[in-house]
Amino acid sequence: MIHVAGLLASAQEVVPARAQMATTLGFHIILACYGIAFPTIVLAAEYLGLKRSDEVAMTLARRWSQALGVLVAVGAVTGTVLSFEMGLLWPGLMRRYGAVIGLPFSVEGIFFFLEAIFTGIYLYGWRRLSGWAHFWSGIPVAVSGIFGALSVMAANSWMNQPGGFTLRAGRIVAVEPWAVLFNHAALYEMPHMVLAAYMVVGFGVASVYALGFLRGRRDRYHRLGFAIPFVLAAVLTPFQIFVGDTAARAIAGDQPVKFAAMEYVAHTSRGVPEYLGGVYSGGHVYLGVSIPDLDSLLVGFSPHTKVTGWDSVAPVDRPPAPTLIHLSFDAMVGLAFLMLGAGLWALLAWRRRRGLPEHRWFWWLAVACGPAALVAMECGWIVTEVGRQPWVVYKLLTTAQAATTNQGVIASLTAVIVLYAVLGVATVLILRMLARRWREGGQDEEIVPYGPPSGGTPPRPLAGEGA
Amino acid sequence: MVEVVGGILLAVLTLYAALAGADFGGGLWDLLAGGDVRGRAPRQLIDETITPVWEANHVWLIFALVVLWTGFPTAFAAVMTVAALPLWLAVLGIVLRGAGFAFRKEVEGLRSERALGATFAVSSLLTPFFMGTVVGAVAARRVPLHARHSTLAAWTSPTSLLIGGLFVGVCAYLAAVFLIGEASSRGDARHERYFRRRAAAAGAFTGALSLATLVELHHSDHALYHGLTGRALPLVLLAGVAGLAVLALLALGRARGLRALSALGVAAVIWGWGVAQYPTLLPGTGLTLFNGAAPHATLVALVIVFAAAVLLVGPGFAMLFWLHGRRMLESGAEP
């Protein structure tokens, strides 16, 4: 009886716990993207600045690194919230699988350390470190950002394809660390997220300068500020589409029920149609475009490929809200092609005139790519996380079993929503304020009073002053 | 191997307490620095001291959490369930402090600076206090193994509240001592004296609270008290001697050796707790290092990861602190 009552209690808390995890992860992942990819973009600008003695590139690098400082600080604390939530919201997961899922997180710890240490050196070393020494102090930040992301993705992909341990009577009795870190899903989840981070930041930063371009700011500063991040993101987009396509095909085999929800496959069959858009209700797809046989073709390169439907498992083992999962998947894929189009447009213009496109529509498209990349990334997380339900560890532990038995998650959920709304607004306001200050002041030091310390050596002329 | 991982956990906690503790304490001194005019100079010193290093110091907490949940998952889940409320409040402090600190640098205008500065300073108090109460809950045998709900009683025992206060005191003490060194390296005699007085006050406060905690343990928790005055006595004495030596150096006006001695004292307290409690993981539950640890392969992996972290992160930290000590890293904005 007690056991049943306990299950009921946890079933009540699992909904707010999932909502809180979704809120905090959905928020942090944006900042995490900036932690992963923004350093590379800042370093690219600094490299150009140093290599060509290009003051415009140097100014961009210095200003971007100031914005990076704000984003990294907020990301460090919102990431800490997630670490605590692993225990505060999901003690059932940690009690049973902590010894396994903790391993990739411990590896991530090393990279988080390196990232934080060298961020401290890079962000605050502009004045007193010599040009190339300063540049090289940023390289570990970019590298450890990528490897940290790979470690976290190892943990997430393990939840989708758990392995590398022996369970006896509900207890973990043996662990194979390598099999945990390099689980099957890690092979496609890892590159997918790192590429997504680069696209979110690349298109995101570029969209700010695209908007400036539309408002008449067309000097070299704005063109370069657009080109560096945009080119990086646009070059990676086709690779991301390839990785995503590979991942979807792998999921059709690894997690067929998730795939069924992504593509509205109710019954296991051959010649499965591909739905574009559409709302699923009571066995019908409304308002969607159906392309015959395409889903089978995409899964197995033949219209006769058998695709597993969600009728292969009992209703309780199916993810909720197939419409949410399917539309999120479609939005992600559709937006990826929008971004691909923007990149191709820029490529054509470059081949023709060795310059950026001048057409206003291109610049509006480039503005749209910023939010598009962000929305696509969040949609991807909805697909993989909601699509894994009701499991937290696929086919081994349900999310309800993992959730805290404490009541009152609704209170922490409310607090988190309010706090993160304030935090998000404040972060955007601060970034806008920095942008305004840069526009008005031209030279940062006049507005941000650096005040060289008494008795110190004079700041290095090239990078330090921006003049 | 279990003992090694337990030692790693204590080592990581020690580094977190000694390094990030001083950053939290900086927030306390920022809070107590007085009005805009009077507090301007000490606030700036605190800001410049903390800015380039606080994020790196903060990572020790993440590492401690990961070692705890990977190496000792049962204990982790129990603590996270029973002490949920103070842990949420500690997390709230971490978020507000980090964000307040980062934003304060960039905003313009006294009013927003003041609001964000107050957020940073007040939240610097929240985190150590509530973390202390959680440690107190463990030490005072208030964390049962299979509890399903958090309770107020778990972390509001006199022991918990005393340890919460002790954590705040230790942070203030470490910060003041570190800031003496910082002021002294800048040849700033005024702030050297300023933080010398505060270090002495915080040291006396912390010492008194430590003794009060020992007395309270004598009444309420014989097992831990006997551990502390038995097997762990050398470490307890070392902590006392280190604390008295710091007070003596402060009275003599010396700056050399202050930081190392104060950190040594704090380390001795943490290791004393560990030794006194060994091999129990959660006092009062029968959960020990041996029956509560992860499988062997996980422990080996943790040791390897820690060794790699020391090899990779150690030189990084050395470089960060060296550059910071030579004032090669500038925070840029005035507080």
Image (cartoon, rainbow, N blue to C red):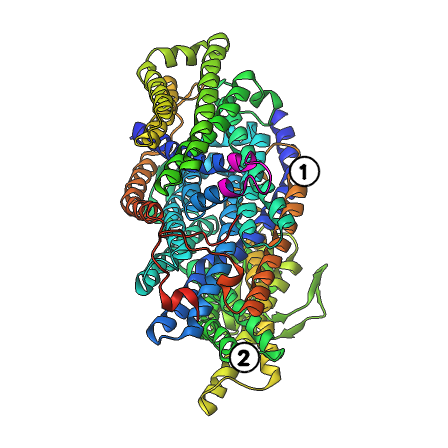
Residue A266, percent from left and from top:
62, 60
Between B100 and A98, the one lying in front of the other is: B100
Name the residue beneath numbered marker 2: A341
Q: Is residue B30 magenta?
A: yes
Looking at the image, which residue is at 60% across and 61% down?
Answer: A433
The residue type indicated by label 1 comes to Ala
Mark yes or no: residue A398 visible. Answer: no
Q: Amino acid at mark 2?
A: Gly
Which residue range is magenta in the image?
B27-42
Q: Nearer the viewer, mark 2 or mark 1?
A: 1
Q: Chain of mark 1?
A: A
Q: Where does residue A268 sit, x and y in percent of width and height?
A: 57, 61
Could you tell whether A57 is left or right of A266 in the image? Answer: left
Q: Which mark is residue A116?
A: none
- At 62% from the left and 32% from the top, the residue drawn is A406
Quarter of the rendering occupied by the C terminus of chain A: bottom left
The chain carrying label 2 is A
Compared with A297, A38 (above or below) is: above
User: Please, is residue A4 above or below residue B238 in the view?
Assistant: below
Q: For this rendering, which residue is in front, A25 or A201?
A: A201
Residue at image mark 1: A411
Exactly how many numbered labels are in the figure? Answer: 2
